[in-house]
């Protein structure tokens, strides 16, 4: 996915819910173990908040970072996927790539 993103996606990480990294393409200097643990914590906190509010689970979380990059976190086949874009990405293109690469059971919104 990083290769076909034309420079839009910088990091793709797949981890288990317990924070164990499964696969990663990481163009940044952050270690995959640290990133997987952090993503797992984010996912767990979001799930806990939604459960406490009796809303259900999440499909996708998008966070705009202070340097104009975006962090996407979403469940996929029992794992957690995290994407970090480069600065000022084309979000429509990122969503299209996510639909193409992670289209299963409606986890990622249809465009």
Image (tube, grey):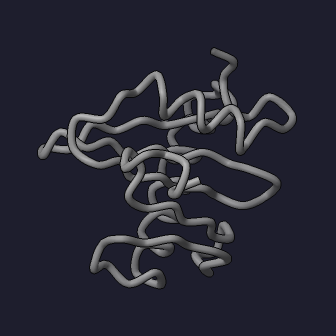
Q: Is residue 52 above or below residue 75?
A: above
Q: How many marks?
A: 0
Residue drawn at x 48%, y 34% as measured from the top left? 94
Q: Residue at x 69, y 30 (%)?
A: 56
The front one of 34 and 87 is 87
Residue for point 47% across, 84% down? 33
Compared across the picture, whether 58 is left or right of 10 comes to right
Residue 35: horizontal and vertical position, in percent?
A: 42, 73
Q: Quadrant of residue 16?
A: bottom right
Q: Specify the farthest residue to the left.
A: 67
Vertical arrangement, residue 42 with respect to residue 15, above or below: above
Percent coordinates x, y for residue 75 in the rendering? 68, 48
State the image coordinates of residue 34 (x, y, percent, origin top left). 40, 81
Looking at the image, is 43 positioned above or below residue 16? above
Q: Position of residue 55 (x, y in %)?
A: 63, 25
Specify the farthest residue to the right: 105
* Residue 108, quarter of the rendered image: top right
């Amino acid at each position: 996915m990083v290769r076909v993103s034309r420079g839009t996606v910088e990091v793709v990480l797949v981890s288990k819910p317990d924070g164990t990294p499964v696969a990663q393409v990481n163009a940044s200097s952050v270690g995959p173990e640290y990133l997987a643990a952090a993503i797992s914590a984010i996912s767990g906190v979001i799930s806990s908040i939604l459960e406490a509010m009796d809303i259900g689970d999440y499909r996708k979380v998008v966070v705009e970072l202070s340097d104009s990059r975006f962090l996407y976190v979403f469940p996929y086949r029992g794992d957690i996927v995290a994407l970090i874009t480069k600065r000022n990405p084309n979000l429509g293109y990122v969503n299209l790539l996510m639909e193409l690469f992670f289209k299963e059971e409606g986890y990622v919104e249809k465009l």
